[in-house]
Amino acid sequence: MTTPAAAAAATAPHEANAHANQFALLGQRRFAPFFWTQFAGAANDNLFKFAFTVMVTYQLQLSWMPPAMAGLAIGALFILPFLLFSATAGQLTDKFDKTKIIRFVKNLEIAIMLLAAWGFVRADAVVLLGCVFLMGLHSTLFGPVKFAYLPQVLDARELTGGNGMVEMGTFVAILLGQVAGGLLVALPQVGHTTVAVACVLLALVGRGVAQAIPPAPATDPGLVINWNPFSETWRNLKLAHGNIVVFRSLLGISWMWFFGAVFLSQFPSFAKEVLHGDEQVASLLLVVFSVGIGIGSLLCETLSRRQVEIGLVPLGAIGMSVFAIDLYFASRALPPVAVMGLGAFVSQAAHWRVMADLALLSLFAGLYSVPMYALIQLRSQPTHRARIIAANNILNALFMIGSSVIAGALLGAGFTIPQIFLFTGIANAVVAFYIFMLVPEYLLRFIAWMLSHFVYRFEIKGDEHIPTEGAAVLVCNHVSFIDAILLMAASPRPIRFIMDHRIFKVPVLGWLFKLAKAIPIAPQKEDPAAYEAAFAKALQVLREGDLLAIFPEGAITRDGTLQPFKGGVMKIIESARAEGIEPPVIPMALTNLWGSYFSRIELRGGQNVAMAKPFRRGFYSRVGLNVGHAVPPVDVRPEALQQRVSGLLAT
């Protein structure tokens, strides 16, 4: 019998694994069995659905379901359970051990596939349509577990890599499942039987691998299930709306599914009517799209320094729009020719631009979606996480239905398929801009990411000392006007900064710091009210369990040396402790930043200015941030903190 302590030990991320790369996770029990379980399930879903679609389209003559309606009917039946049962699935996942839920779902898959096998052998479309709905129910139950399991067993620094692996695995499984389904069902005489056997075998493999998943204890075992799907769906959406950053991230992910559904649904027609290719060309488009998503998902960990880097989301949105729009220009002027096979299609240079656009469009979609999923997992309350993810599945389903309706309306209005791609690319730019203005954290992190990757070579040491949860005070030397932006790039969490009120008057930077909700402070003698207001806001940040950063020198250094620390940090700590808050203090040191464009420099005549003489130290110069061990609040003294920061400057 597994004790609660043993279960917790099995699912808790081990310190030794905290910095393993995403591929190393495949060698660990906490991740590998889960990965292959979801891989087998996604492959089976798509093998079954695609084989059935091909059978109805090419092999059966059904008066009540013409071939043109088959794909639509199968897709609608599969997505219907997401609308009806996602809310219930989220509750079950929060209430019960996630591993038990996974095994139950895989048992259900075996039963459904046995029924589907009988339907394939008998070529019974009614039975198979029922199985489509049941497989949709299977996926609905698995959805909240899939994303609620990861943050329970992975360290915060592994979430991006873990989600990238799952996203990549899902799209590869979809691709392999569809290819296998199309090939197997087309086998003469034995096609239907072969598909039946393959579906059952995949279900059995998935269930066998699921047996190795370690326990993942319930996060809210006392939850009382509300079996009314409509009232619970509404309650889930309200629950998600309680955290505005999370809710708007849910909308962002749902928009990505809207965007992707437009392209995926149009691939067959695009291949036939615009590219003048046969079925193999349509399959090639799917392959290119899936590979692009997989590569983009895997790139997220490398580009994010193994933290939840939502700065990649605007980058992904920009790429999605740019290459969707270019796809319109690449495909609108292709001359009408006879239907081409795969060899003839790839031999023409114009088609390579089309495939490059598709590959890059989907790659940037991977960069867009993975950090958003990781952010939702990290910021959602653990006891409600599965229900938040269930709300996301509901929104995804609604947005995908909306995409079908809008694409159909545009086609009915006379739009060509390239024009629909153009419309979608422009709409994506508008929606992304709107989301990033509503949630400026995305835009701020994007600017910080760009600055730390393309303006400077930014190296961080000791970032594991930055707390991933709870209140803390960060203290750092003050070298330049962009110190705060570089600290943003180093932290997996938002930081509220106390900053000299004069910096808010600097063009562009002042606007950015206002977006970041930085707290302006003036000297007590100059403006006593602003001084006290700043400390009141700082205390509120700590009450809310967030990160607060202060530059104790009080001003940017004029000569590159560390200045004496003032007593503001003591006032913050003493006020926090008076309210029972014990925030650790994290010393930090920015290195090699003095002398760069954003730091001060003495010009001829003795004038000491910043942001003069661009490239005075070259381009893409190396700078760093050294993060030290936390100092308990009881031990905080300005002189001691200054010595710690000075020591970090010397490392």
Image (tube, rainbow, N blue to C red):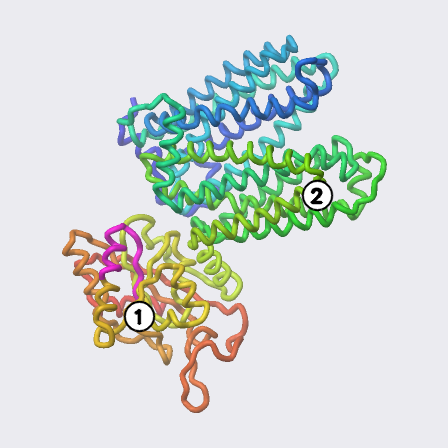
* Towards the viewer: 134 or 265: 265
Residue wearing tag 2: 418
| Element carrying mark 2 | helix
User: What's the amino acid at mark 1?
Assistant: Ser
- Are the residues at dot 2 and dot 1 in contact (C-beta closer than 8 Å)? no
Counting residues from the start of the chain, the first of labels 2 and 1 encountered is 2
Judged from this view, the residue extending furthest toward the front is 413
The magenta stretch spans residue 543? yes
| Residue 240, horizontal then vertical, whole percent | 38, 38
Residue wearing tag 1: 646
> Callout 1 environment at 10 Å: few (<14), some (14 to 19), or many (20+)?
some
Numbered circle sitting on residue 37: none
* Towards the viewer: 490 or 226: 226
Q: Can residue 210 be seen in the rendering of this structure? A: no
> Callout 2 environment at 10 Å: few (<14), some (14 to 19), or many (20+)?
many
Judge from the rendering whether residue 321 lies leftward or rightward of residue 87; answer left or right: right
| Residue 267, horizontal then vertical, whole percent | 68, 35
User: What's the amino acid at mark 2?
Assistant: Pro
